[in-house]
Image (cartoon, rainbow, N blue to C red):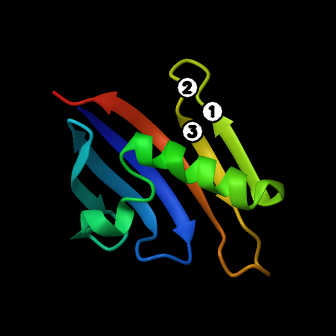
Amino acid sequence: SYDVKVTLSCVCRYRGTIDATVENGTLVRAFVRDAAAAAEPDGLRPFMPIDSLFAFVRRQLRDNPEQLRVTFDKAKGYPRSVEWGSAESGDSGVLSTDSLARSR
């Protein structure tokens, strides 16, 4: 189980800084700081838990490799930054994993 903070900028349901908790591989809580509101986990499933983020990166790599940039955390190996798409494609965004830590 872990807590993760991401910043998401895209044409998607939720944008801004999101605090989330993942337990046993399932996203159980998400809070959008900028909206000061809870987020429905279904709207974040392409990006969380981290396994879903890896799957998202694989899909983007398969479908649009020329429009994908990923930076990985050197110590833990998870995606720290994912940029996909282009303004022309209408499907673009940037996700930054700001922190990832074990839950208490």
Q: Which mark is residue 9?
A: none
The furthest residue to the left: 104
C-beta proximity under 8 Å, tags 3 and 2: no
Q: Which secondary structure, mark 3?
A: strand
- Quarter of the image with the N terminus is top left
Q: Which residue is mark 2?
A: 77
Q: Which residue is mark 3?
A: 79
Task: Give above or below for 91 relative to 78.
Answer: below
Disc 1 marks which amino acid?
Answer: Phe
Q: Earlier in the sequence, mark 1 or mark 3?
A: 1
Q: Are marks 1 and 3 in contact (CB under 8 Å)?
A: yes
Q: Are marks 2 and 1 in contact (CB under 8 Å)?
A: yes
Q: Position of residue 15 (x, y in %)?
A: 46, 70
Residue 64 in the figure: left or right of residue 16: right
Amino acid at the residue labelled 2: Gly
Mark 2 burial class by Cα count in 10 Å: few <14, some 14-19, many 20+: few
Which image quadrant for residue 16? bottom left
- State how far apart marks 3 and 2 are (Cα): 7 Å
> Which residue is drawn at the image coordinates 74% and 54% (left, top)?
68
Q: Earlier in the sequence, mark 2 or mark 1?
A: 1
